[in-house]
Image (spheres, rainbow, N blue to C red):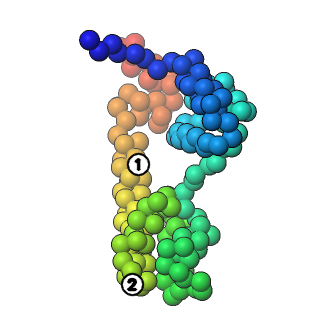
Amino acid sequence: MCLMQQLTLSGMLNFIDGLWSICGHERIIIFTTNHKDRLDPALLHPGRMDMHIHMGYCTPAGFDVLALNYLGIHDHHRLFPEIKQLIGEVEITPAEVVEHLMRNEDVDLALEGVIDLLKQKKEEKIENNKEKEDEKGEMPEEQSDVKENGSDEAESKKDI
């Protein structure tokens, strides 16, 4: 018979503390989250999590490091200005960039692949913004009256 057990904060803390007591300073434990603000402070207590590293989106300077590490580009490449401009306009993770850098050993083809990806992301961003604007424009009639004419007219419609 299989019993379903829940993971509790207490159980997680005991697990982490147990690992440290057994392993000492010989182990690195990596935790990831998209919502650090939602974690219990007891989990973030020094001794349990001693280093916090924010893994943000790729920056133009970060791209330089990736191009050096994955393509061996030490100097400025003719496609860098376009790539860096696009990186400034969209949100893209370093992992997404690396995935495209590794697809081709030819530097020009690899960088053109990154440009294609960035342009695609830019188009998606524009499309998402249009959809959000369209959603804002489609308010129910009563709400649009409140916005356009003030709350008094909306209140009088409710009384009718």
Residue at the location (36% across, 42% down)?
135
Residue 75 in the image, given as x and y percentages of width and height: 60, 86
Mark nearer the viewer, 2 or 1: 2
- Percent coordinates x, y for residue 117 in the rendering: 38, 68
Residue, far front:
22
Q: Separation of disc 2 and disc 1 at Cα?
A: 41 Å
- Residue denoted by label 2: 106
Q: Is residue 102 above or below residue 42?
A: below
Question: In the image, is 16 to the left or to the right of 79?
Answer: right
The quarter in which the C terminus is drawn is: top left
> Can residue 137 be seen in this snapshot?
no
- The residue shown at (38%, 52%) is 128
| Mark sitting earlier along the chain (2/1) | 2
Q: Position of residue 23 (x, y in %)?
A: 63, 35
Percent across and percent down for residue 35 are 55, 36
Query: Tag 1: Cα neighbours inside 10 Å, few (<14), some, or many (≥20)?
Result: few
- Please state if 106 lies on the left or on the right of 31 as rendered: left
Q: Secondary structure at mark 2?
A: loop
Numbered badge on residue 133: 1
Residue type for callout 2: Asp
Front one among 104 and 13: 13
Q: Nearer the viewer, residue 3 or 145?
A: 3
Judge whether 28 appears above or below 97 on screen.
above
